Image (cartoon, rainbow, N blue to C red):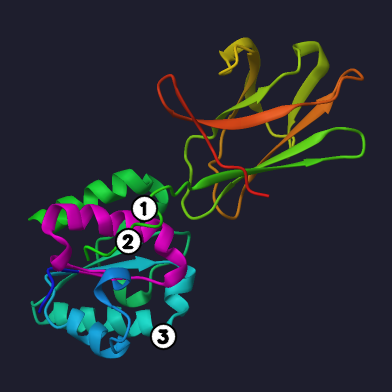
Amino acid sequence: MSHKIFLSHNHADKPIVEPVAVRLAEIFGIDQVFYDSWSIRPGDGIIDQMNKGLEAPEYVFFFVSAKSLASQMVKLEWQNALHAATRGKTRMIPIRVDGSSMPALLTQTLYIDMFTVGLEAAIAQIVSVAQGSASFTPQHQGFSNLTFSAVTGADGSIAVTIQASHLMEPNPSFLLLTKNLEEEISWTHGSNEAFFGGYNKNAFTSSNGELIHAILFKTMGGAITPRHPLQINLSKRTDAPLVLLEVRHEAGKNVWEPIPYKA
């Protein structure tokens, strides 16, 4: 059976490929989308199934990353798709998911820049392009491009690092939730760069009715990328210990979503 859509990717990129696969399956039907997690079942010959998936798809979406470019299997997939495209059988659309440069063979091809526009906008573009197993359970629907870690120093200070795992984050605007009063805490940019910020007293109320304060921190320029994380240093002004509850990212107007903690 031929598939309408083939998703060529490296296993390491599944957290951002799977939400795309699920959305496409919801629209076109799971039998029209070749995604190895549901298209190749235990006991199937992997190479045979991959060849069948590539027989005559209308679209091949090639997820370009450092890992996929280094994969011989993925390289074979996109080169076969490119060959099919030259014969007018298949349309190949690269999707850039990290800061990697496009292969020379693909530089003349229009591509979707997920690294710049983000996951949701890229999915909308993919669906737009593609529109011209019951036993499968999604594993990566909770994907978060941003995570944070916090390291407490000997002096009680806290170094907060906000990291992007796959994509560029163009809106580096965050809230750091704390129990500390304004006179107990100070904050600086880890690279001594300019930033906009302020203390918001009683910004939130916890489930048990406790008032929580928030420190707004927004860099003045420069996006967060996998290679360029953001570090925020919290320092003590008094003997009171610092308490960092969580970090939230500005996802929209007056919408602040918690980002996961990564140990």
Q: Which segment is the magenta one? A: 6-35
Look at the image and tell me in which quarter the N terminus lies. bottom left
Coordinates of residue 138 in the picture (x, y in percent) = 34, 57
In this view, the residue in front, 160 or 81, is: 160
Which residue position holds label 2? Answer: 95
The amino acid at mark 3 is: Gln
**Residue at the (8%, 77%) spot, across then down:** 88
Q: Main secondary structure of the magenta part?
A: helix
**Residue at the (10%, 77%) spot, across then down:** 2
Question: Which label belongs to residue 114?
Answer: 1
Q: Secondary structure at mark 2?
A: strand
**Residue at the (47%, 39%) spot, across then down:** 170
The amino acid at mark 1 is: Met
Label 2–label 3 contact, CB within 8 A: no
Q: Is residue 42 above or below residue 38?
A: below
Residue 162 left/right relative to 97: right
Mark 3 or mark 1, which has the lower sequence index? 3
| 31 in the magenta segment | yes
In this view, the residue in front, 231 or 153, is: 153
The amino acid at mark 2 is: Ile
Mark 2–mark 3 distance (CA, rounded to whole Å)? 18 Å
Dot 2, how many residues are within 10 Å of its Cα: few (below 14), some (14-19), or many (20+)?
many
Residue 33, by quadrant, is: bottom left
Q: Secondary structure at mark 1?
A: helix
Mark 2 or mark 1, which has the lower sequence index? 2
